[in-house]
Image: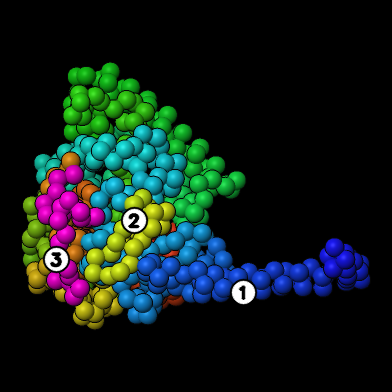
Amino acid sequence: MSIIDGLLTSYSESWNSSPLFTVTSSILILLLTLVAYAQFEQKYFANPNEPPLVHYWVPFIGSMIEFGIQPLHFMKKNREKYGDYFTFLMFGRRMSVCLGPNGNSLVFNAKHDYANAEDAYNHLTKPVFGEDVIYDVPNSILMEQKRMAKSGLTNESFKTYVPIIIDEVNKYLDENWTKDSDVVDIFKAVSEIIIMTASHTLIGPEIRAQLHTGVADLYHTLDASFTPIHFLFKWLPLPSYYSCKSAHEELAQIFSKIIDNRKKDVGNTHEDMLNQFINYKFKDGSKLNDKQVGNMSIAILMAGQHTSSATTAWSLLNLANNHHLLDEAYNEMQDAMGKDLPYPELDDLKKMPILETIVKETLRLRNPIIQIMRKVTKPIAIPGTNYVIQPGSYLVSSPTVTQTDPKYFPNPDKYDPHRWDTPSTTEAPKADDDTPAQSNKNSIVDEGDVDYGFGSINSKSAKSPYLPFGAGRHRCIGEQFAFVQIRTILYTIIKRFDFELDPKRGMPLPDYNSMVILPTGPASIRYIRRKN
């Protein structure tokens, strides 16, 4: 006790004589103690059966800051050091990174009993989408909800969507791009265009008619909740948490009134997703209640809003930065449609492959979502290694790492839509460490052709070097709609305007402060009205 009493007395005397020095010294000693403990922990308590752990200096925090600032660089750097499998600590969570074709396949095809997306994402998506939809339901119900949504994304529906998208883009351009030339924030512009086109085509004219009353602002508020801090913390007393809750409640009330009016208006037929949600019957004969219909409507728009906005903006920025490609696109449009450039129908889009390759290349180089996560619930032995990932850890894959790997895409940092002129580019490679498939009984991954409830998917597709829409049970069902929407938007804008980067700002860098990788704002381009 005399030693403790002496230390307390010494500390008290130091505080009385120099409180600032005492506080500073105390903080420094605490930090040094934490750093020392972190080194001791990593050296003496490392699990030899776990993928190698990335060195960190501060306990609990781990590599969170480095990963948060430059996640893609972080993964590529540690891949060079440790290989395709490694673990890093992020705010107390053990994140096991699985890269390359085999790593992607492990994460995307992991059986639901071993790793799932619900436990990884529900605390992030539930405040935005609402209760009883997407990750807030058992996986079997989620698969039925995906099947329900996918049944509304048909070729016949797309035929009706194209003229609606064209009309919405033209309305926006007429109201906002009124000068012969001006500098605009292209991400802000296309975000508004995406929400208008998606709401009108997918959900219907009623919700679109209310966008000017502030509904778009509510969606933007929800959109702003997809950030790393919302992933790390289920709830914090911060303005973004309160505003997200308020925006969802207000949107739910709006949808409740629209749904009620739809049900009363039995004389009119509506060929949109909202009508699909109202009338769809599940396998057991049940239907969604009005609250679930509203939440599904919110989710279906939010699911593609951020990613499609980012992809469209990056496409236009890259065309502005590579003006010869913009000229090629304009010339191909004229060759396909005629010098007067009439507006296309769905089948006409196929006559202009450069629009598709522009979108493909943008998704390769600037994939909006660079990491996919699953929460591990049973020990996962990584095939071909001695590593075992323990329950409670997170699996992390990044198709973007493979999509920017020179092994599969020569000169990967160059924006080159013509690399897609050769169909073989998209073929799945045979992974270097490919191992024979385990028996179905013991396999930790789904194998062969699997129907998760929304259509058959071949598990081998997860080994493709190009996976912008994911793979496996959580593969994005909106891929075809996204291509139709973005190509139609590109055609409509390129038909009316030439454009170039704002010389004052140049090409923006990726902004990693969101869960979706956006251009750092303002993402400025100068549009020039075409004379014809």
Q: Quadrant of residue 370?
A: bottom left
Is 95 located above or below residue 433 in the figure? above
The alpha-carbon separation of the residues under discs 2 and 1 comes to: 30 Å
The alpha-carbon separation of the residues under discs 2 and 3 comes to: 20 Å
Residue at horizontal 83 percent and vertical 65 percent from the top: 4
Residue of label 1: 36
Residue at horizontal 29 percent and vertical 61 percent from the top: 381
* Magenta span includes 331: no
State the SS at label 1.
helix
Count how many numbered circles sit on residues in the image: 3
**Residue situated in front as seen by the camera: 253 or 85:** 85
- Three-letter residue code for mark 3: Pro
- Three-letter residue code for mark 2: Pro
Is 356 located above or below residue 159 in the figure? below
Nearest to N terminus: mark 2 or mark 3: 2
Residue of label 2: 379
Residue of label 3: 436
Badge 1 density bin: few <14, some 14–19, many ≥20, Cα 10 Å: some
Instruction: Classify residue 331 as left or right of residue 102.
Output: left
Magenta-drawn stretch, dominant element (helix, strand or loop): loop
Location of residue 376 in the rendering, given as x and y in whole percent from the top left corner = 36, 53
Nearest to N terminus: mark 2 or mark 1: 1
Residue 115 numbered mark, or none: none
Q: Quadrant of the N terminus?
A: bottom right
Residue numbers of the magenta segment:
430-452
Q: Quadrant of residue 532?
A: bottom left
